[in-house]
Image (cartoon, rainbow, N blue to C red):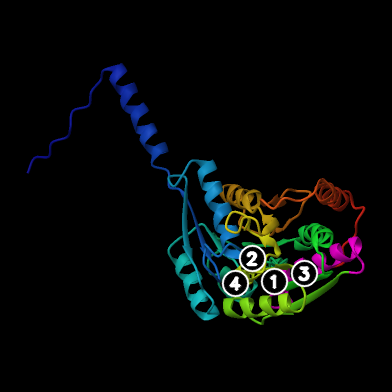
Amino acid sequence: MKKFSAPVLRTPGLLFLVAFLSTAVAVGAQDPIRVAIVAPSSIRDLSWSQSIHSSLKALQEDMGGESVLHIAYSEAMSSVSAASETLRGYAEDGFDVIIAHGTQYGTSIFDMAHEFPNTSFAWGTATDTGSDRGINNVYAYQAAAEEGGYVNGVLAALLTETNVIGAIGPIPAGDVRLYISGFTQGVKSTNPDAEVLVVYVGSFSDIAAGTTNGRTLLAAGADVLTGTSQVVVGAIEAVRSAGGYWFSTQSDQGDVWPGTVVSSQVYNWVPMLRDIIERFQKGQYGGIAYKLTLANEGLRIAFGTVDISSEMLMAAGQAVEDIIDGAVEISP
């Protein structure tokens, strides 16, 4: 059977147009960077998991939308074994950057990092990138949560009328421990007579326990509460009902509880995420430990709608300045 070939058009202008359109199609068809998040709680938890998802969505918008940056996520992954399977699934599906948003997932990503050398993994809060074990495609990240905790503590010390302040956390580890330690030091530096009652509920997901312990702290005389992780939403409701005040960390909770949340330490992961993606595009897949601080604007203080005095605002501003300048040393 005779084979026929399409005729070649020799018109110079037309050849130029065809070449231009071919190049444009190739550029337009470039695959987006694919990023996956595995998070221990809901991406709408007003806390830890929401902070990373919101930052990634903000970066997506800034980069030009889904055609440039594709986001997938798996939330409420409290089971480490199930999370490990999910992480592996994303790697096998060819995702470029995989974020294991919890220290409990560290073993899982180190176990599979060698199998997927062209995939960037990131986990936090942590400092270990695995470089001492020959791993070069893992990033670690953490937040200097004690810094914003200190600022919140200064404000709480000026706001309390009973000199009893309560703090709620899941377990004394990671940024939870750092935040509550910094908060306590901020209180004591401003009001040595104030007492900070600290309760750990033993879980990252037991909201009912957070509610119960919040009420217990209020019954003990606390008129100001703070706390960290997704367990605190019930405690915020409790202090709101009692007419007290709340100080937040990780995400801005002021919009949800106006008139109750005085200030929030907000985690801004955007610069870190941008850097990870840009490095991936250049062929670098890991090896850096990131840290959010007030100085690098990875941490910021957001004020709610509570009417506070100019003295308190000045005290907060001074605390931020002193931390950045190194005039205040916060023990972790």
Badge 1 crowding class, 10 Å Cα cut-off, few under 14, some 14 to 19, many 20 or more, is: few
Residue identifier under label 1? 133
Real-space Cα distance between discs 3 and 4? 18 Å
Residue 306 % position (x, y): 69, 53
Residues packed near mark 3 inside 10 Å, few (<14), some (14 to 19) or many (20 plus): many
Q: Which mark is residue 180?
A: 3
The residue wearing badge 4 is 234
Q: Amino acid at mark 1?
A: Arg
The residue under label 2 is 240
Residue 127 in sight in this render = yes
The magenta stretch is 168-193
Secondary structure beneath disc 1? helix
Q: Is residue 170 something one can see in this rendering? A: no
Q: Earlier in the sequence, mark 4 or mark 2?
A: 4
Q: Say which amino acid is labelled 3.
A: Ile
For label 2, the SS is: helix
Q: Nearer the viewer, mark 3 or mark 2?
A: 2
Q: CA distance from mark 3 to mark 1?
A: 33 Å
| Circle 3/circle 4 CB separation < 8 Å | no
Rendered location of residue 216, percent (x, y): 70, 80
Q: Quadrant of residue 151?
A: bottom right
Residue 11 left/right relative to 171: left
CA separation, marks 3 and 2?
20 Å
Q: Earlier in the sequence, mark 3 or mark 2?
A: 3
Q: Position of residue 6 (x, y in %)?
A: 17, 32
Label 3 or label 4, whichever lies nearer to me, is 4
Q: Amino acid at mark 4?
A: Gly
- Of tags 4 and 2, the one toward the viewer is 2
Q: Name the residue at 91% across, 62% down.
A: 189
